[in-house]
Image (cartoon, rainbow, N blue to C red):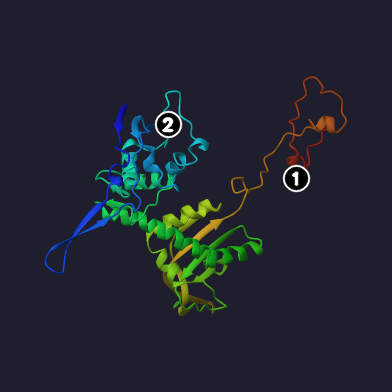
Amino acid sequence: MTEEHATGGACLSQSACRVTAGAGGGADVTKEAWPAQPRPLSHDRVTLVVDGTHFVVDPAVFTAYPDTVLGRMFGRARQHSFMRPNAKGEYEIAEGIGANIFRVILDYYRVGVLHCPEGLSLAELREACDYLCINFDYSTVRCRDLSALLHELSNDGTRGQFEAFLEKLMVPAMVASAQEGERECHIVVLTDDDNVDWDHDNPPPMGEENSRILYSTKLYRFFKFIENRDVAKALLKERGLKNIRIGIEGYPTCKEKVKRRPGGKSEVIYSYVQRPFIQLSWEKEEGKSRHVDFQCVRSRSVPNLITAMGEGPMRAGATPTPQVDELNRLNGPAPPSLDQ
C-alpha cells in the first residue's frame, strides 16, 4: 500500500492574479478570487483508502462542493454520514475506482477542474464522476484526447435526445401495438419527405404492412450513427424492453413497375430505400418454449392391453404384449385380436 498527502486546499485559499495591459501602456493587475470565498485551512486530516492507496486529505476541500458524495460525507452533516471509518480510523471509499482516477478527482476539489492525463481512460473517469456526483462537462474536464472527450459529451446529448424521441414518437407506436394484442413492435423510421404508395392489390410480400411507420427526419439522422444506436439500445433495456434490434433495412416506398406473368398474374416491383428500424418486445414469458410438446408419455392408468380387456395373467410361453402409449392407443390402428 502507498500513502499520499494532499495539501487539502492550499491553492484554493489564495487569489489568482491576471495581468492586463492598461490604457496608458502600463499594466493593471486584476485579482480574481477563485473560488469567490477562500477557504481557510483546517488542521483536521482524514485518510481515504482507494484501491489500496492511502490519501491523507484535509476534509475542508470537500465542503465547497456539498452536492457531491464526498461533500456530503465530510460536510456539515459529517456526524450523520452513512460512511464510518474502519478500526484504524481510515475511510474506505470509492470501491471500484482506481487510485489514478481518484488522483484526478482530488484535483477537481483542489482547483475545480479534472485534468485527465494521457493514457487514462476518459470513460472510467466519467463513470467515477457519475458515481461521486461530480459534474462532467467541458467546463470541468481538460483532456488532451479531444475525440474521447467529445465522444463522452455526445453520449450525454444522445441520451437526452433519444429520451425525447422515445416519449414523443416511439411510445405511442408501441402502445398502439399493445392495444391490438401484440407483445412486440417493429418500427420503421422514414424521413419527412418519404412518400409511400403501395398497390393495394399487390402489397410488398415481406410483411411491411405490420410495421409501425414514423415520419421523422430528425430521428432518421439520429440513427445514422452506430454510437447513437448503442446508447438507444442501452436506454431501452433500462426501460425494461427486450429482444431489442436496431439497424438499417430496405423499405419499399412505391411501385416501380408491373410485370405480367404467364396466366395473367401480375408482379409488382417496388422501389426500396435504406431506413432505420427498431425491433423490440415486452413479452414476459419470452424464455419459455412456444411449441406444444406432444411427446408420448407412458400411461399410468392402462399398463397394457390385457389389463384393459380384463384378462387374467399372461399364459406361460405367450408373447408379451407391448405397452401402448395413450396417443398411440387413441389414434393408432386397432390392436390385433388375441384369439388369432
Residue 195 at x, y = what percent? Answer: 47, 78
The answer for how far apart the CA atoms under marks 2 and 1 are is: 75 Å
Is residue 298 visible in the rendered structure shown here? yes
The residue under the point 57% across, 55% down is 281
Question: Which quadrant of the figure has residue 53?
Answer: top left
**Which of the pair 305/57 is nearer the observer?**
57
**Nearest to viewer (mark 2 / mark 1):** 2
Q: Which residue is drawn at 44% across and 73% down?
A: 191
**Quarter occupied by the N terminus:** top left
Q: Where is residue 330 in the image (x, y as percent from the top left)?
A: 77, 43
The residue drawn where x is 47% and y is 63% is 277
Examine the rendered structure and indicate whether residue 161 appears above or below residue 5.
below
User: What residue is pinned by disc 2?
Assistant: 91
Furthest residue to the left? 25
Residue 207 visible, this angle: no
Q: Quadrant of the C terminus?
A: top right
Please tell me which residue is depicted at 52% across the width and 37% down the height of the picture: 80
- The location of residue 152, given as percent across then percent down, is 36, 54
Going from N to C along the chain, the mark reached first, 2 or 1, is: 2
Asked whether 153 or 193 is in front, the reply is 153
> Label 1's element?
helix
Above or below, 15 relative to 315: below
Numbered mark located on residue 331 in the image? 1
As shown in the figure, which amino acid type bears the numbered disc 1?
Asn
